Amino acid sequence: MSILVNADTKVIVQGLGKTGQFHTDKAIAYGTRMVGAVHPSKAGSVHVFEGATDPSGVPGRDETYRVELPIFRTVREAVAETGADASVVYVPPPFAADAIMEAADAGIRLIVAITEGIPVADMVRAKRYLEGRDVRLVGPNCPGVITPRECKIGIMPGYIHTPGRIGVVSRSGTLTYEAVYQLTKLGLGQTTAVGIGGDPVNGTDFVDVLAMFEEDPDTDGVIMIGEIGGTAEEDAAEFVKSEMTKPVAGFIAGMTAPPGKRMGHAGAIISGGKGTAAAKVAAMEAAGIVVAPTPTDMGQAMLEALGR
Amino acid sequence: MKIHEYQAKQLMAERGIAVPVGRVATTVEEAVAAVRPIVSETANPVVVVKAQIHAGGRGKGRFREHPELGGVTVVTAGIDGGVEAAEEAVRELAAKMLGSTLVTVQTGPEGKPVNRLYIEQGIDIARELYLSILLDRAVSHEVVMASTEGGMEIEKVAAETPEKILRADIDPCVGLLGFQAAALGWGLELEGPAHANFVRFVRALADAATEWDTDLIEINPLVVTADGDVMALDGKMAFDDNALFRHPEVVAMRDVTEEDPDELEAKEAGLSYIKLDGTIGCMVNGAGLAMSTMDIIKYFGGEPANFLDVGGGANAEQVATAFQIITRDPNVKGIFVNIFGGIMRCDTIATGIVDAVKKVGLEVPLVVRLEGTNVELGKRIIDESGLDVISASDMKDGAQKIVELAK
């Protein structure tokens, strides 16, 4: 088992520009079931992906692949033709929120928005549009979602992941890789790793993912990686304390970040005294989460939380 | 992106949102010339001279060159002496303020140079209120915050007397509704014409906030005059950088002299850089990793000189620019490059570092930690370059080494 995605997930890509092509190729090499693309100006044609299969990906495949990916005008057409249930969005920022809402309208179950730099007001509207619909948005401004050796949606390097029993959820891309790599080196594989993204308005927060991992019988423990800005980590700590039975480890980036400055991510800002790393660490520790003192200790913190 | 008070008021005035009459001046003569039309238009001999910088606390701030002078000064000479006296007083003030350095609680001890003044009508203030519109991340939409405690620091009000903060949620489908605005007005103890004026003001401002893609609009104080007029006495606005592409009129208001030149250069090169006070320069890929690299330096007793995220797809040229910006800082006594190459390949980073060092030279210790895609190739490029680079096995090892070397 896993959460959000597995070997059966059928994925379309929205936005088959340079970035979309690059990462679609990597996803196919990993073994993700990419079934189509939405890119109006190229609609009606196919894009051919071929190369050497990623040995760290889905096992039991040929050493090379050749996929003719059909390109559609709309998500609706793509879903009707391919039966896709998930979408990954690489559409440029001015049009990305529209792409997200289009996917929701077309009945996509899981939308993973990679695009960085979407206007906040667009995401406020998109999130309101998604309310009450049977759809989950992950991101934007995130690395994506991966269930090792089953399905990779996004821009993370596949080879650092190993199948296993630890859930990973994070606001930061490279810190997720750091955590996953440490877990893998310690022999702790992952059920699923979810990047929820660095924007102030996102589709899925820590609590949503923690709840899924709590429900997943194949997940033994969770590592959550937060950063300054907002109160999502405090809310997560509250949830861990009251609702979770599984051990949780964590890390917060930005102990030394000055207030009022946006630290790379649109959402990573301490404003009006709110969103400091110290407050988040305190809330997490009070909830029994083992917080790593440095990013090099994230894997170790997970081991400690598991009581090993 | 931030703009000046006078620019915020200009935007508000264009939408019929009430602001005092005023004119901007960059020279003493312009400041003097502003007085007569303001006085004649408002039939009020009192004017206010306000220093324009991108920082708050101007009223209580003081000029370094003229410690007796605040950043906001009321000129009353016109009451007895007529408009000529007001002009002379403004001439004297403007001569002192322009080109001087204003130090406020928000500028830090180094202060900010004042290059523009805003000359504004004096207002007969009956009450000072607080009003702001900003994103509440917990609910993923904007909210209006209002308080009877105008002119105060709102964080302090929120901490000490939270019951004095009123709030209205803005549903992005319908905007701020009439009943919400009315309830806010009554909550602020406004009645009659002042209440009607407030409702009009706050609804127009809420619509504008959405249309302009503001991160923050803060009106502190929002004043009620003796006649029941409601207007913005101050105006602070910041815009969502990601939405600037659709607001050329806002981009045109950018005052680059208010921004750090290194941060600006980095932004133009597609890098995210923030200068700090420490001695260890950092170059990292990814915002979270960049922040935690600063943290781990501090953890081992060092102080980071900067935040620098080269992003996920940096090329050798960007790496070189990043290097130049870091080494330009005279406080930097050592550099720590920390890369987890996911999509970014370590050999690209290594080539960038070698090129940059050859181009700009290296006078301080350099510790490099590479991990991820093509890591062996990256390490070989650095080893074979003959440069004096210290390799680190992981982030902790690298942080400890650079802290030691930069002592």
Image (cartoon, rainbow, N blue to C red):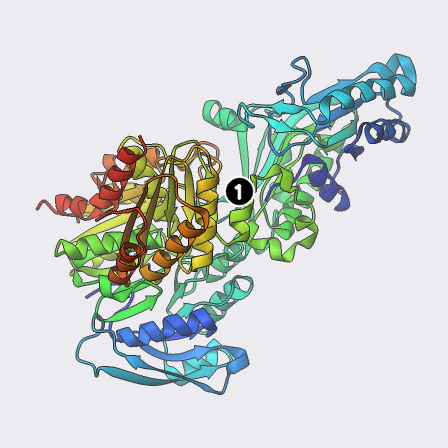
Of B391 and B290, nearer the camera is B391
As drawn, A95 above or below B295 = below
The residue lying at 28 percent from left, 45 percent from top is A239
**Residue at 28% of width from left, 57% of height from top?**
B384
Q: Amino acid at mark 1?
A: Asp
* Above or below for B274 versus A113: above
Residue A180 or residue A270, whichever sits in front? A180
Q: Quadrant of residue B345?
A: bottom left
Above or below, comparing residue B260 to residue B44 in the picture: below
Q: Position of residue A200 (x, y in %)?
A: 45, 49
> Percent from the top left, x then y, of residue B239?
59, 46
Viewer-closest of B29 and B187:
B29
- Residue A22, x across and y down, in percent: 39, 72
Marker count (numbered)? 1
Q: Is residue A233 visible?
A: no
Q: Is residue A277 above or below residue A248?
A: above
Q: Residues within 10 Å of mark 1 (few under 14, many from 20)?
A: some
Looking at the rendered image, the quarter that the C terminus of chain B falls into is: top left
Pointer 1: what residue?
Answer: B262
Q: Quadrant of residue A27?
A: bottom left
Depth order, front residue of A269/A23: A23
Residue B210 screen position, x and y as percent: 61, 50
Q: Name the chain under label 1.
A: B
> Which quadrant is the N terminus of chain B positioned in?
top right
Q: Is residue B103 left or right of residue A97?
A: right
Q: Secondary structure at mark 1?
A: helix
Name, please, the residue furthest toward the front.
B386
Residue at horizontal 91 percent and vertical 19 percent from the top: B84
Residue appearing at x 41%, y 55% in the figure: B355
Image side of residue B267 versus residue B120, left or right: left
